[in-house]
Image (tube, grey):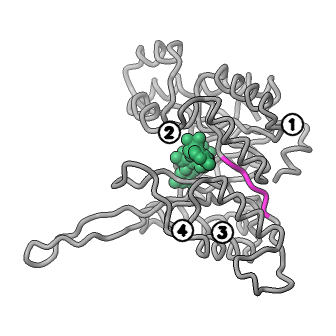
C-alpha cells in the first residue's frame, strides 16, 4: 500500500465500509461496493466493531450479562473483497478486547489469507466504560499495536522458542485527528503521539473525517513540522441527513464550519441536506486534490449513493 501511495501520479480513490449487522448476507457489502468499482478504488477499508454488553432477563428476575458482537466478519469480508474484486482490502485492527497473543494470532490469520495491510487502532471505550480499558495482557495504545506488528514483520513472534520464523510483511496505517483526538490534552500533544506511531513503524496516516479543509491543512503542516513525513490521507464523509448535522459532530468530536451550517439550516428535507452535503464534499475534494493529497478516503457508513455522486465529479 505504501508503495502505491508514494508512487501514484494521480490522486487515488478509496473508501471505508462497515460489516453488515449480524444476520445480513455479504451481498449487502457487494451491493455497496459494486456502484463504486467504476472509479477503480485503490483499496477498501473494513471497520472492526467490538463487543457490546447486554443484560438478558433470566428466571427469578436474575439478569445475565452477555457480550454480543453486532457487526462481526471484518477479516472474512476483507478476504471476500480481495477474492471477488481483486483489490486491496484493509481490515481495521484494534487493541481493545484482544490480548497480545490473540492479536498475534489474528495477524497470522491475515498473513495466511494474503492480507498485508492493516489500519492499527486503539479502539474506543465500550459503551459501559467511561474510559478505554485495555484487555489484560493487551495493547494499551495504538503505538503498542504498531510495535507488535513491526515485531512480526521482523520475524519476532511472542514465543521466543520459535526458530527461523517467517516474517510478515504488513503495511501499517494509523489514525490522525485534524481536530485532535477527544481525549488528548491539546493539539500539539496529539501530534507528538502521532509521531510516536510513525517512529514505531507506521507507514501512513488516515484522518478522522473533517469538514473544514483549513483544519486539515494546518494539521498536515503541524505533522510536517514535527517530522512526520509519511503520506497523510484525508477522510471525507458527506453529510446525508438532518440527523447527521448533530450526530456527526457529537460522535466524532468535530466541528461543522458555519458556512456549511448556514447552508444546511436552509434545508427542509433529507434530500436537500444530501445535496448540500454532496456539494460541500465535492468542493473539499477538489481543494484537497489541488493541494496534493495522494488519496481521498470516503466514509460510506454503508451507503454508497452520495459517494458515487462525488466520485463522478472528481475521478
Ligand atoms: P491512539 O493513537 O492510541 O490514541 C488514543 C489517545 O491516547 C489519544 O488521545 C492520544 O493522544 C493518546 N495517546 C496515544 N499514545 C499515548 C501514550 N503513550 N500515552 C498517553 N496518551 C497517549 N474504532 C473502532 O473501534 N473500530 C474501527 O474500525 C475504527 N476505525 C477508525 C478509522 C479511522 C480512520 C479513525 C480516525 C478512527 C477509527 N476508529 C475505530 C476510532 C478510534 O479507535 C478511536 O478514535 C480511538 O479512541 C483512538 O484510536 P487511535 O488509534 O487514534 O488511538
Q: Does mark 2's beta carbon lie closer than 8 Å to ligand 1?
A: yes
In space, the residues marked 1 and 4 are separated at their CA atoms by 38 Å
Residue 80 - label: 3
Residue at left offset 66%, top offset 19%: 214
Residue 41 - label: none
Residue at left offset 7%, top offset 77%: 60
Q: Position of residue 140 (x, y in %)?
A: 56, 57
> Does dot 4 land on a helix, a strand or a loop?
loop
Q: Quadrant of residue 115?
A: bottom right
Magenta span of residues: 170-174
Residue occupied by mark 1: 10
From the image, which quarter does the C terminus lie in? top right
Q: Is residue 173 magenta?
A: yes
Residue occupied by mark 2: 183
Q: Position of residue 295 (x, y in %)?
A: 77, 39
In space, the residues marked 4 and 2 are separated at their CA atoms by 21 Å
In space, the residues marked 1 and 2 are separated at their CA atoms by 35 Å
Amino acid at each position: 500500500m505504501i508503495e502505491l501511495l508514494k508512487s501514484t501520479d494521480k490522486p487515488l480513490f478509496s473508501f471505508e465500509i462497515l460489516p453488515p449487522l449480524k444476520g445480513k448476507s455479504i451481498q449487502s457489502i457487494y451491493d455497496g461496493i459494486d456502484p463504486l468499482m467504476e472509479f477503480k478504488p485503490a483499496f477498501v477499508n473494513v471497520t472492526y466493531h467490538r463487543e457490546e454488553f447486554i443484560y438478558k432477563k433470566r428466571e427469578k428476575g436474575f439478569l445475565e450479562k452477555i457480550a454480543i458482537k453486532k457487526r462481526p466478519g471484518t477479516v472474512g469480508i476483507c478476504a471476500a473483497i480481495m477474492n471477488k474484486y481483486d483489490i486491496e482490502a484493509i481490515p481495521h485492527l484494534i487493541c481493545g478486547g484482544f490480548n497480545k497473543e490473540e492479536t498475534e494470532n489474528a495477524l497470522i490469520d491475515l498473513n495466511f489469507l494474503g492480507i498485508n495491510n492493516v489500519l492499527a487502532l486503539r479502539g474506543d471505550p465500550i459503551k459501559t466504560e467511561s474510559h478505554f480499558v485495555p484487555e489484560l495482557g493487551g495493547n494499551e495504545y495504538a503505538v503498542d499495536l504498531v510495535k507488535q506488528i513491526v515485531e512480526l514483520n521482523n520475524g519476532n513472534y511472542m514465543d521466543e522458542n520459535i526458530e527461523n520464523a517467517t516474517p510478515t510483511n504488513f503495511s501499517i496505517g494509523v489514525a490522525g485527528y485534524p481536530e485532535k483526538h477527544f481525549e488528548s490534552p491539546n493539539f500539539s500533544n496529539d501530534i507528538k503521539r502521532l509521531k510516536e506511531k510513525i517512529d514505531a513503524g507506521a507507514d501512513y496516516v488516515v484522518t478522522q473525517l473533517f469538514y473544514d479543509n483549513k483544519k486539515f491543512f494546518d494539521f498536515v503542516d503541524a505533522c510536517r513540522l514535527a517530522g512526520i513525513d509519511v503520506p497523510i490521507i484525508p477522510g471525507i464523509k458527506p453529510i446525508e441527513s438532518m440527523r447527521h448535522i448533530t450526530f456527526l459532530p457529537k460522535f466524532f468530536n468535530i466541528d461543522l464550519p458555519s458556512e456549511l451550517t448556514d447552508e444546511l439550516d436552509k434545508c427542509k428535507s433529507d434530500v436537500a441536506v444530501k445535496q448540500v452535503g454532496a456539494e460541500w464534499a465535492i468542493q473539499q475534494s477538489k481543494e484537497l486534490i489541488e493541494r496534493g493529497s495522494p488519496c481521498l478516503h470516503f466514509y460510506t457508513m454503508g451507503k454508497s449513493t452520495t459517494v458515487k455522486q462525488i466520485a463522478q465529479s472528481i475521478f
